Amino acid sequence: MKVLVVHGPNLNLLGTREPEQYGTLTLDEINAMIGALAGELGLDARCVQSNSESEIVGLIQSGQDGQDGGSYDFLIINPAAYTHTSVAVRDAISAVGKPAVEVHLSNIHKREGFRRHSYSAGACLGQISGFGATSYLLALHAAKLHLEK
Ligand code: DQA
């Protein structure tokens, strides 16, 4: 089963970006953790980062008619700042209709008021927020359990 993991804007800077919020692991290190757990769970994870809303919409659409990229069975997405701004990302998740989990490293409900609202979470099975890199690993377990149902 294929899991697409999409990391949104500024997550390429993990490791040095606001470590008190996001920890000190780099995105490559987090992707290695995702790959290792996916292997243990028998899942095939593809991790992609983009700073562009348009590219993220394209990634979510991958495998649909006329879109590049392989298809996938489950979406794990950290839309980062687009969580709080993007109807386009939400609509893409709804349009494709694949099961999805929204992930955040930090607990967005403990931070500034504008971070408490997510456009995308309503198009997902659920949201995992506040566990650092472990949020992605919990999402992989959620994917495995959902795909086995
Ligand atoms: C984030 C939380 C967002 O509010 C923020 O814009 C990010 C990262 C997180 O993973 O905690 O870029 O999605």
Image (tube, helix red, strand yellow):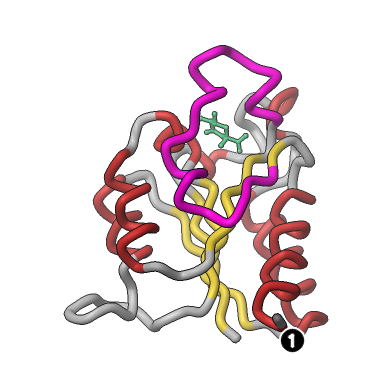
Residue range (magenta): 107-128
Horizontal and vertical percent position of residue 130:
74, 35
Horizontal and vertical percent position of residue 45:
60, 75
How many numbered circles are shown? 1
Q: Residue at x 60, y 86 (%)?
A: 1
Q: Indicate left or right for 94 with 130 as reference.
A: left
**Residue nearest the observer in this picture, 94 or 137:** 94
Q: Quadrant of residue 20?
A: top right
Q: Name, please, the residue furthest toward the front.
A: 149
Point out the quarter of the image occupied by ligand 1: top right
Residue denoted by label 1: 42
**Residue nearest the observer in this picture, 98 or 63:** 98
Horizontal and vertical percent position of residue 70:
39, 83
Q: Residue at x 70, y 81 (%)?
A: 149
Horizontal and vertical percent position of residue 14:
62, 40
Q: Indicate left or right for 60 with 31 as reference.
A: left
> What amino acid does circle 1 point to?
Gly
Q: Residue at x 49, y 17 (%)?
A: 114
Q: Quadrant of residue 36?
A: bottom right
Determine whether the beta carbon of the residue marked 1 sits less than 8 angstroms from the nearest atom of ligand 1: no
118 drawn magenta: yes
- Within 10 Å of the Cα at label 1, are there few (<14), some (14-19), or many (20+) other Cα atoms? few
Secondary structure found at label 1: loop
Q: Name, please, the residue furthest toward the left.
A: 66
76 drawn magenta: no
Q: Indicate left or right for 93 with 33 as reference.
A: left
User: Is residue 47 shown above or below 103?
Assistant: below
